[in-house]
Amino acid sequence: MQRLRWFVSVAVIAGGFALLVGHHTQKAREPAELPDFSLAQRPQGDRYLFDYAHLLEHYTEGSEKYLHRIAQRFHMEAVIVSLPDLGQAGNIEELAVDIVNHWEIGRDHEGRGLLLLLVNEEKQVKLEVAYELEDVFTDAFTGYIEDLQLKPYFLRDDLGTGLIAVMEELEQRARLKHQSNYTPGVIAQLDAALLAGGAGAKRRLARYRETESLPDTPSSELTDGAATPQEAWRTMLTKWDGKGKQLKADIYTEMTKLAMGDQNNPEKRTLSALAHWKSADFQVLQDGDHAVIYFGNVKGWNNAPFLFCNTSGGWKFDIVHQRRLVVMDQNPDWKVEQGNYPYVNLLDQVPQSTGKDLPVDQEDLYSCARDKDIADEIRALEQRNASDPDNFGVVMALARLNVITGRRPNHVNPLIKQAKRLDPASAEPYKYSAIYNVNTFFQYQTALKEIEAYIDRRPDDVFGYNFLGFLHYRLGEYKKSVDALEKAVNISGDNAYAYALMARDYALLYSSTSAIDPRRARYKKAALDMLSKAEAVSAPETLRIKWLKSWLHRREII
């Protein structure tokens, strides 16, 4: 066992986009059309996101569910409002206070309310906190959120990533307030950690404009990666800690560089001064060219694993699979995504997720072996797109690669929108939009619209019906899921994915049906029949069958 002496925030590295929605099966409530903005009263009482500036249109479903969860779990109300400009208000501070008061934010939670206000024209941010929360959501905390967590992303048109950073911080403090297990000293220590990160510094926009881009470390200055996963992990943390500039080892894959920039100058939200990391024990789990830095099957986001792969240049940090496979559930839970992916077999004893278990074609799966080629192709396509933005082939190719490598929304959503505009009849933008909404945001209702549009354009493609069945399954619509999957197997009977998912559908229908209902026995038999069919395909998926049998056993189907 090894002992660490560095500070890291794994929740950020592991693809915190999932934090916007939580990770459990539920029927998504689709927000109604946004009423006109009115300062006099709150336009819709059961709504939490009011995006009048259209800054967060790609995050509506996830943000609504996340904010609803905060209200239900922690008995406080957090509301997000974006406006095109300040209007008649003198400044953002006055406007935020007026909205909190007139909209009575927190009224139904004993006054525990807060407002995150975004003003687009002025690129201003304000976190207004009701009096009842001020002991936990302090001035130091709000300054940190406004200046270091959100504003830098706002300025470089990556507001979605900044919003996730805010959600993480809000939930941590909301939990403290709800559990009431804190003292002024505890809050002071938390604030001191934030101030040490620069929250107390003078607020100047120029300071943040310097960080608008994430430059790559010139490859000519770096040698190959590490000789072992353990060495790669230690080297990476040394660089993140600001003590490794003299180390020339290159421990980022090319896609990790595109995602994270300079190895010696990580984004502020990558680092977190958590005492846990000073003494955390870890193991190295390895299977061929894939390895996991593993802290045990222990709750806590800071115990989630890190993934490394052995490239032609040595062992390096694999951000693509990290974001794809390590799922941050409701704090403190974390899970590993099921599916036919590397690393998963190393972690088959830890909590598992089916939230992103998509029927993705092999050609749309990233691999470390192709990392440099994919990154080089992305860079080349970006140059071509800059000079010829109306070339559908270039736009769609770049969007596809950005989706399958899990790049940030500002690298994906504008391209998807552009591709739809350039070729309305093409099915491809809808396919990759659906994949992205699930893999990055767990936005099943949003993805449902996209995959239905894909099926309209490609009605004979098995992928569309497999995906449709998955979405209905995740939304708790099991009969609709079966209907879609039956269409998939009618197109291709050798379909292990569809049979395994139908087994789950029928098992859940069995569990939700009364013991005296004659359909119950039929549902159980159908679940077992689907299991048998999944095992009988020409290329059965061993891990999928193993997980399915374990799941069916827990539900007393087998």
Image: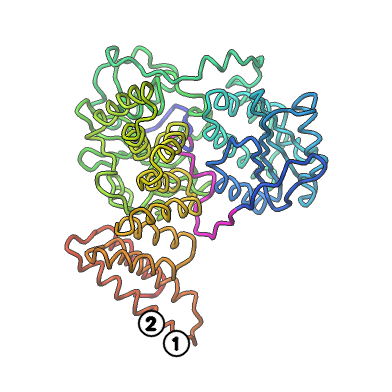
Q: For residue 190, which numbered disc appears in the image?
A: none
Q: Nearer the viewer, residue 168 or 229?
A: 168
Q: Quadrant of the C terminus?
A: bottom left
Magenta portion: prevailing SS class: loop
Badge 1 is on which residue?
Answer: 518
Amino acid type of the residue that numbered disc 1 sits on in the rendered structure: Pro
Q: What whole-number distance in Å separates the C-alpha atoms at marks 1 and 2?
A: 7 Å
Q: For residue 522, which numbered disc appears in the image?
A: 2
Does the magenta segment cover residue 27? yes
Left or right: 518 with respect to 249? right
Q: Which residues are magenta?
A: 12-30
* Disc 1: CA contacts within 10 A as few (<14), some (14-19) or many (>=20): few
Does the magenta segment cover residue 427? no
What residue is shown at x 31% (from left), y 64% (from top)? 488
Q: Position of residue 444 (x, y in %)?
A: 48, 53
Q: Position of residue 254 (x, y in %)?
A: 31, 26
Amino acid type of the residue that numbered disc 2 sits on in the rendered structure: Arg
Residues at badges 1 and 2 in contact (C-beta under 8 Å)?
yes
Q: Secondary structure at mark 1?
A: loop
What residue is shown at x 73% (from left), y 52% (from top)? 45
